Image (spheres, rainbow, N blue to C red):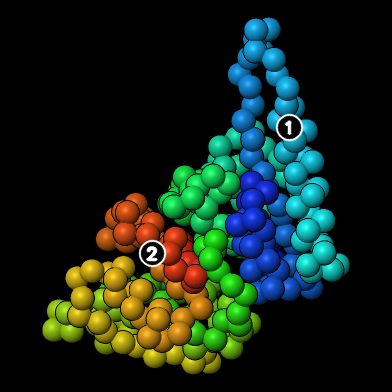
Amino acid sequence: MKNILLPTDFSDTSMRAAIFALDLFGTEGVQYTLLNTYLKPAYRNALIPLTVDTERSSRNGLRRMERRCRQHAGTVYIALRSSFEQLVQAVNDLDAAKPIDLVVMGTQGEGNYGRVGRNTSSVVTSALPPVIAVPAQWEPAPIAHILFADDGQAIPRASLDPLLAIARRTGAHITVLYVGSTANDPRTKEQLRKLSSSFSGIPHSFTTVEDHAVTDAMERAVVEKDIQLVAVLRRKRSFWERIFQSSTSKRMALHTTVPLLVLREKG
């Protein structure tokens, strides 16, 4: 990972996500970019006193966030970006200018208690780079076990790159979890062989769980297998798209302490 984007609203949750990224990827050879988006007044009304300069507030907040990151990580390359665009558009614009390897952000923003923030949901479903969403309840711990949810379809090798990079960096074991009927498993032996080949050199195993409630099965696996990171592949049109937009996925992302890596379909 060379270029990591850290969207922030300056909340404790966004700082926790930054700590997750700094601890996982370190500081050597990595560029972190702190991004804050703000609302730009469409017009100035003399009857409505404008007491806050939103752009200046954004830049000041970024500098404070930068100091907190440096206090945690020491010497680290951090760029600051302030934008009045919608967050997804700002992320995609930065990715177009210089490809982003990974976006790491909190699941909740300031004031989003009890639910996943709208910004996080939109970035997970619409931003171009892969995303790690870090729950507010996450506590620092080494990543030793990763759960990869398999939808039974062929997986482009390039889509797995962020997952493989994390597994190699941490030495974690990857459990590939297919939720469905063993008798009706759509994965061919060739698909399984290719998937296993993609994990070459990385400890991994395959398991099938017969359960129609996907998120419930994943949550049980997180507890039973002592998982520190859950990974899923968001395809352009697939069953997983409904998972990201459903209340159950929001409940899973919010009430677990495990970060969620959302990979992008490539190829």
* Of the two numbered discs 1 and 2 in the rendering, the one whose residue sits closer to the viewer: 2
- Relative height, residue 39 to residue 95 (above, below): above
Residue extending farthest right? 75
Find residue 214 and report its image quarter.
bottom left
**Residue under numbered circle 2:** 252
Tell me which numbered mark, 1 or 2, is placed earlier along the sequence.
Answer: 1
- Relative height, residue 38 to residue 185 (above, below): above
Does residue 266 appear in this view?
Answer: no
Mark 1 touching mark 2, by CB under 8 A?
A: no
Seen from the viewer's position, the closer of residues 38 and 204 is: 38
Q: Position of residue 68 (x, y in %)?
A: 78, 58
- Which numbered marker is on residue 55? 1
Does residue 178 appear left or right of residue 180 in this picture? right
For the residue carrying disc 1, how many other residues have a C-alpha within 10 Å: few (<14), some (14-19), or many (20+)? some
Does residue 233 appear left or right of residue 248 in this picture? right
Find residue 84 and report its image quarter.
top right
Element assignment for label 1? helix
Does residue 260 appear left or right of residue 219 in this picture? right
Q: Quarter holding the N terminus?
A: bottom right
Find residue 254 and report its image quarter.
bottom left
- Relative height, residue 1 to residue 248 (above, below): below
- Relative height, residue 67 to residue 148 (above, below): above
Element assignment for label 2? helix
Q: In whole angstroms, how far apart are the C-alphas of marks 1 and 2?
A: 34 Å
Residue at image location 59% in from the left, 88% down from the top: 171
Q: Position of residue 50 (x, y in %)?
A: 70, 19
Residue extending farthest left? 183
Residue at image location 73% in from the left, 22% down from the top: 51
Seen from the viewer's position, the closer of residues 50 and 87 is: 50
Q: Quarter holding the C terminus?
A: bottom left
* Amino acid at dot 2: Met
Residue at image location 64% in from the left, 35% down from the top: 38
